[in-house]
Structure formats: C-alpha cells, structure tokens
Amino acid sequence: MTSLPIATLAYLGDAVHSFFAKVRSLNNLSVGRIHKKVASLVSREFQAKCLEQLFPRLSENELRVVKRAMNSKCAKKYGNDENYRKSTALEALIGYLYLIGDRDRLIEVLSFSLTEHSDDRVR
C-alpha cells in the first residue's frame, strides 16, 4: 500500500477524516454548526498540530508514509507551507491505515486527530 501515490493516500485519508469528523459531530447540532465544527477539525493548522503530537508515537511504517507525504510534490502544492505539508502527511497516514485494514490504529489516530490533545495520548 505504501507504493500508491501520496496524492491518492491523502485524498482517501481526507475523505475518511472528514467523514469521521462529521459522524462524531452529529450531537443534535444543526447542519450549519456541524459544518463549522468539522471545518475547524480538518483545517491544515489543526491537522499539522495533531501530526506534530503523533510523530513520536508513529511506527516505522507509519513514519515512512508520513515522511514520504511531507516531501511529495502534492504536499508542496503551496510552496513550503509547513502546515499544508503536515496536513497532507496526516491525511496520507489515515489513507494508509484505512487501506491496510488496521482499524484499531485508524480509529486511534482519527480519535486523536479530532480532539484537543495532550502529550500523553495515543501510543
């Protein structure tokens, strides 16, 4: 699965991440409020912050995907925007976990990426 183009992994990861954020935000909120909440959770700034906190907890394979994504052509779409590169890497990681079928780790990373976090969460 790591041989797939990073843009493909990130595209899939973005879809999975957005869907998971929407499902978690349903708490009887209006569609407008759900959209606003989800938009903040899937922003490049928030995703970059999540990835920074996940870095020390990544396996070798996960780290390989993340590094490949951060250095990819699609991650450099906006020049050297560090947040965009990191958010693309988080999305690629999510896409990778989805495709390899590691549901437990996927849920762990998604849950972490959609909450305010501290250094003691996620392996």
Image (cartoon, rainbow, N blue to C red):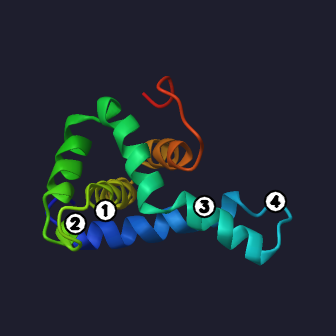
Residue shown at 76% from the left, 76% from the top? 31
Mark toward the start of the polypeptide (4 vs 2): 4
In the rendered structure, which amino acid carries the disc numbered 3?
Ala
Mark toward the start of the polypeptide (2 vs 1): 2
In the rendered structure, which amino acid carries the disc numbered 1?
Tyr
Residue at the disc numbered 2: 75
Q: What is the crowding at mark 4: few (fewer than 14 residues within 10 Å), some, or many (at least 20)? A: few
Say what secondary structure mark 1 lies in: helix
Name the side, left or right, on which 54 lies relative to 110: left
- Locate residue 33: give its quadrant: bottom right
- Locate residue 12: give its quadrant: bottom left
Residue at the disc numbered 3: 21
Q: Which numbered dot is residue 27?
A: 4
Is the C-beta separation of discs 1 and 3 under 8 Å? no
In the rendered structure, which amino acid carries the disc numbered 4?
Asn
Is the C-beta separation of discs 4 and 2 under 8 Å? no
Where residue 79 sits in the image (x, y, percent)?
A: 18, 69
